[in-house]
Amino acid sequence: MISEEAVRKKILSYLEAERPLPCAAEEEKLSFEFLDSNFVDSIKIVELVTRLEEDFGVRFEPEDMQSVDFRTVKGMTGIILRLASR
Amino acid sequence: MSPSLPGDVVVLPAPGRRWLLYNVFTRTSLAVDGAGLAVLADLAAGGEPAARTCPTWETGVFGNADGLLADPTRIIRDARQWPPAVEATAERLAGRCRELFLLVDDPGAYRARFGPKKNLLDATKTGNFHQQLGVELLLKRRVNPEQWWVRQKFEDGLSGIRDNLYRAVQHSFLTGYFPKRLTPASSVVDVGCGVGYYTELIAASAGSTLGVDPNAEYIAAARRRGGKARYEVLPVGRPGGLDPIPSASADFVFMSDALLFYFVPPVPGPVPDIDLLFREVRRILKPGGVFISVEPHYIFWLAPWLGDQDRPFTVLTEYRRKDFGVTAFMSRLVQAFCRNGFQVSWMEELWPDPAFREVDPRAFHFADNFPVWQLFELRSA
Ligand SMILES: C[S@@+](CC[C@H](N)C(=O)[O-])C[C@H]1O[C@@H](n2cnc3c(N)ncnc32)[C@H](O)[C@@H]1O
């Protein structure tokens, strides 16, 4: 079983590899729209996707990736947990 | 409020008493039979649909996944290749038509979808051609766009050009053009040379040939071919990008399929400065030297291929205000030349080799009437 905590940590570690998200509180980080704020570019997005797929043995569908949930750490965590439980 | 069929939708006849609904802006489509067409008309009129269910056929395909010069229409041409019919309730048909923008509830919201995506995953906007291709390659097919670019144009090992419009139009034209235009005394710089295929075609007719490109992998591939030309990785498009090339050293500067990036960037971000590039091109040209530009045609490249195979027509959805297109419109390109002291000394539109008619009749007839590339020869004024 993958824990929610582990998924969140992993996503944040990739996102914040170069610089921290511009948020003070942890809760803010989880709902920060890192895609729409241009925090990551397309190349980084694809890297993030491949790494998470390898780490958690899931495969995102284009619909998952283009969904509103995919734009925040919280939402992305939910998608990964859902795919991993199948 | 009842949904409406946007004015962007055309209905095309299809074999077997079927009708293909095609949104010319989104290039999405679905085929239905007469009953399905009536259901949509009933819904748009705000009434109860007469038929309960009707068959639908998914006719969409991202044709450009096969290549930048492949059929851009996004319709599976051969009706025998359509997936089996899906029997749909009126509700389901309406739902699918909404997804495909063949039926819209809110015309304002529908119109607002057209425009650039903020990023690769932005599904609220349709995005331009580069972005749509990016979604297809990176999210759906999971392939590296740079390697894809090489594969869609060249045969394995860069031994030749694939038998598509690249070969039938661009390559066949340049094969005849370089020997006429260049002599063993000519020195030529190929700017944005990619993997060096045309650079070697130039080198076969010219005295000295240099290919430059910002992509180190492409330059490495060009060098591996072991041809006559020299290659350098240079940050073309950035300030000082061509600095290592001496002033007044080239009789010709050649550029193919690269100027378009100076108008619409291939990935979201700033466009490189074309004025800066052209100043550099003028600097490295000898007095009386010629800048040769071969670019995707500013009107017809990526226009849908409609009509009968041997009697094509097209529908233009934009020219000046580009939501989808990625080339400059005519005056924008020509003014960029003129603004930087170039004079047009020759211009032509490129046509396919007649032998291509047998290989791909639809592509041949389209490109034979609606040019997909244009060439400019420019002199320093
Ligand atoms: C579509 S390819 C064309 C390559 C080659 N000229 C041909 O016709 O086969 C575009 C090339 O432009 C290069 N490029 C990228 N940015 C550029 C820029 N700002 N100026 C010139 N070329 C650029 C790319 O690395 C790529 O090799």
Image (cartoon, grey):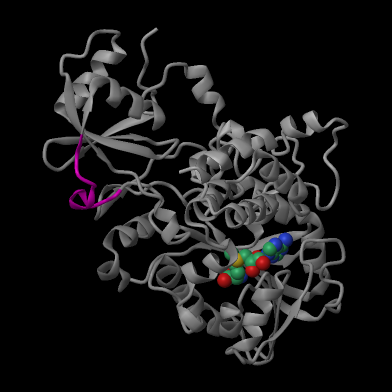
Q: Is residue B175 above or below residue B114?
A: below
Residue B229 can be seen in this image: yes
User: What is the x, y in percent for residue B273?
Assistant: 78, 54
Q: Is residue B98 above or below residue B210?
A: above
User: What is the x, y in percent for residue B158?
Assistant: 51, 81
Name, please, the residue furthest toward the front: A1
Q: Which residues are magenta?
A: B76-86
Asked if the magenta segment contains residue B82, the reply would be yes
What residue do we see at 67% from left, 91% from top?
B207
Q: Main SS type for the magenta part?
A: loop
Quadrant housing residue B172: bottom left
Q: Is residue B37 above or below residue B175?
A: above
B289 and B196: which is toward the camera: B196
Q: Is residue B165 above or below residue B56?
A: below
What residue do we see at 61% from left, 91% from top?
B227
User: What is the x, y in percent for residue B83?
Assistant: 23, 47
Q: Is residue A12 left or right of residue B97?
A: right
Asked if the magenta segment contains residue B83, the reply would be yes
Image quadrant for the C terminus of chain A? top left
Where is ligand 1, by quadrant? Answer: bottom right
What residue do we see at 54% from left, 54% from top?
A57
Q: Is residue A41 left or right of residue A61?
A: right
B5 and B273: which is toward the camera: B5
